[in-house]
Image (cartoon, grey):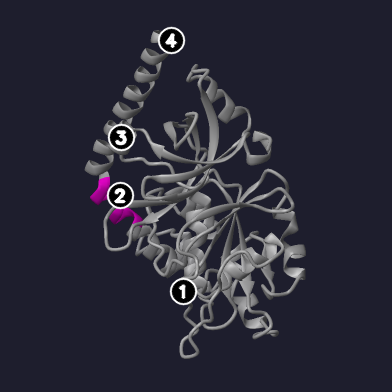
């Protein structure tokens, strides 16, 4: 397979060429489990493991990453370097005050929500902020249209939430589902699916793959909650040439330093805030507050503003709490990158 078909563009090529090691080959991570990886290269897929020193680095490759491999005559290849990411989808690791990488180098993210009990505009807002922060374009996909053919109420609820984001309602078992999503599945584009369990991500993945490739399971009758049929993140090459990343269901979508993503997801609130008399307006009792005026007139939905305010405070708390950790992590990352490139240069000098 041509590397360009896997999303290897001039930016990634320049980063790889800077390693200046003729024995290395570029590859894209398509599956990861602990320190074991499956990587797609121009010569096909191979199993790979992190080189010893990379195991100690805080930043390990995730699905969608580009890496530099050294391929032996037999056995596992070794991952020698992680190429810089264009962006990454991440969340706060459940129960732990640290980030968790979901996938990297994405073009589109399909935010999946069913039209029945799983439908929750506030959760979709949170997901949109994550996607914008990752540097990807979000698409809202509402599933189980066969169970809820009249989705007028849900459509109205998304009027302010979507704000220019494409919205599609479909039945994942219907062949026409692939046709609706075709504009986002062009050759070489990387698309990820996110959503809670039971919303139909795996069924949709099977539909886009053109056949039943992955196991699916029924939802519970009592609460529509699904079972985790996808247990790890994995990248698939679709018949269209697009690269699709399926992810396990995520019941918790904790944001992690998503300030710019929040501003994009809540563009209407951000635009109002720019009209406030004071640049540091807290939107409480300050005179000339455009946000409070919009709330009072009904131009801004109260529930939407409360959601924005909640997420903003959540992010601020995490940033304040993690600043010392972030500084230390950046130092470790810089030292690791320096060691990595120095080692490669030394090895090149010995050849």
Q: Nearer the viewer, residue 110 or 327?
A: 110
Q: Is residue 139 left or right of 134 when viewed as pictured?
A: right
User: What span is colored magenta in the figure?
Assistant: 315-322
Label 4 residue SS: loop
Residue ID for mark 1:
303
For discs 3 and 1, the disc positioned in front in the rendered view:
3
Label 2 residue SS: helix
Instruction: Using a 10 Å C-alpha cutoff, classify the residue at mark 2 as few (fewer than 14 neighbours), some (14 to 19) or many (20 or more).
Output: some
Quadrant in which residue 180 is drawn: bottom right
Distance CA(mark 2)–CA(mark 1): 24 Å
Q: Residue at x 56, y 23 (%)?
A: 14
Q: Earlier along the polypeptide chain: callout 1 or callout 4?
A: 1
Relative to 264, say whether 296 is above or below: below
Residue 330 is labelled as 3
Q: Earlier along the polypeptide chain: callout 3 or callout 1?
A: 1
Q: If the image is split into quadrants, where does the N terminus sit?
A: top right
Q: Position of residue 292 (x, y in %)?
A: 44, 66
Distance CA(mark 3)–CA(mark 4): 32 Å
Q: Position of residue 284 (x, y in %)?
A: 35, 64
Distance CA(mark 4)–CA(mark 2): 46 Å
Chief secondary structure of the magenta span?
helix
Q: Earlier along the polypeptide chain: callout 3 or callout 2?
A: 2
Instruction: Using a 10 Å C-alpha cutoff, classify the residue at mark 4 as few (fewer than 14 neighbours), some (14 to 19) or many (20 or more).
Output: few
For discs 1 and 4, the disc positioned in front in the rendered view:
4
Q: Is residue 178 left or right of 75 when viewed as pictured?
A: right
CB contact under 8 Å: marks 3 and 1: no
Q: Earlier along the polypeptide chain: callout 2 or callout 1?
A: 1
Label 3 residue SS: helix
- Residue 266, can we see it? no
Q: Residue at x 36, y 27 (%)?
A: 337
Distance CA(mark 3)–CA(mark 1): 37 Å
Relative to 269, say whether 222 is above or below: below
């Amino acid at each position: 397979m041509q590397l360009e078909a896997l999303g290897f563009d001039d930016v990634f090529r320049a980063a790889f060429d800077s390693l200046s090691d003729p024995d290395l080959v570029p590859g894209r991570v398509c599956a990861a489990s602990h320190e074991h990886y499956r990587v797609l290269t121009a010569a096909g897929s191979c199993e790979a493991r992190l080189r010893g020193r990379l195991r100690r680095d805080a930043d390990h490759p995730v699905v969608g990453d580009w890496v530099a491999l050294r391929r032996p005559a037999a056995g596992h290849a070794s991952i020698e370097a992680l190429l810089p990411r264009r962006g990454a989808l991440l969340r706060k690791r459940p129960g732990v005050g640290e980030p968790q990488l979901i996938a990297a180098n994405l073009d589109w993210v399909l935010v999946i929500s069913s039209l029945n009990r799983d439908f929750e505009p506030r959760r979709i807002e949170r997901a949109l902020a994550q996607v914008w922060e990752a540097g990807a374009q979000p698409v809202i996909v509402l599933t189980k249209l066969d169970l809820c053919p009249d989705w007028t109420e849900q459509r109205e609820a998304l009027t302010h939430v979507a704000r220019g984001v494409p919205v599609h309602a479909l039945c994942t078992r219907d062949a026409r589902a692939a046709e609706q999503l075709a504009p986002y599945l062009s050759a070489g584009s990387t698309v990820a699916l996110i959503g809670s369990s039971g919303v139909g991500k795996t069924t949709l993945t099977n539909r886009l793959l053109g056949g039943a490739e992955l196991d699916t399971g029924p939802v519970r009758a009592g609460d529509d909650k699904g079972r985790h049929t996808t247990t790890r993140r994995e990248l698939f090459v679709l018949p269209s040439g697009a690269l699709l990343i399926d992810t396990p269901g995520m019941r918790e979508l904790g944001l992690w330093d998503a300030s710019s993503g929040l501003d994009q997801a809540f563009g209407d609130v951000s635009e109002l805030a720019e009209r406030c008399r004071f640049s540091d307006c807290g939107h409480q009792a300050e005179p000339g507050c455009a946000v409070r005026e919009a709330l009072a007139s009904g131009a801004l939905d109260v529930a939407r503003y409360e959601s924005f305010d909640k997420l903003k405070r959540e992010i601020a708390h995490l940033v304040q709490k993690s600043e010392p950790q972030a500084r230390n992590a950046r130092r470790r990352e810089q030292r690791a990158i320096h060691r990595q490139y120095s080692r490669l240069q030394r090895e090149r000098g010995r050849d």
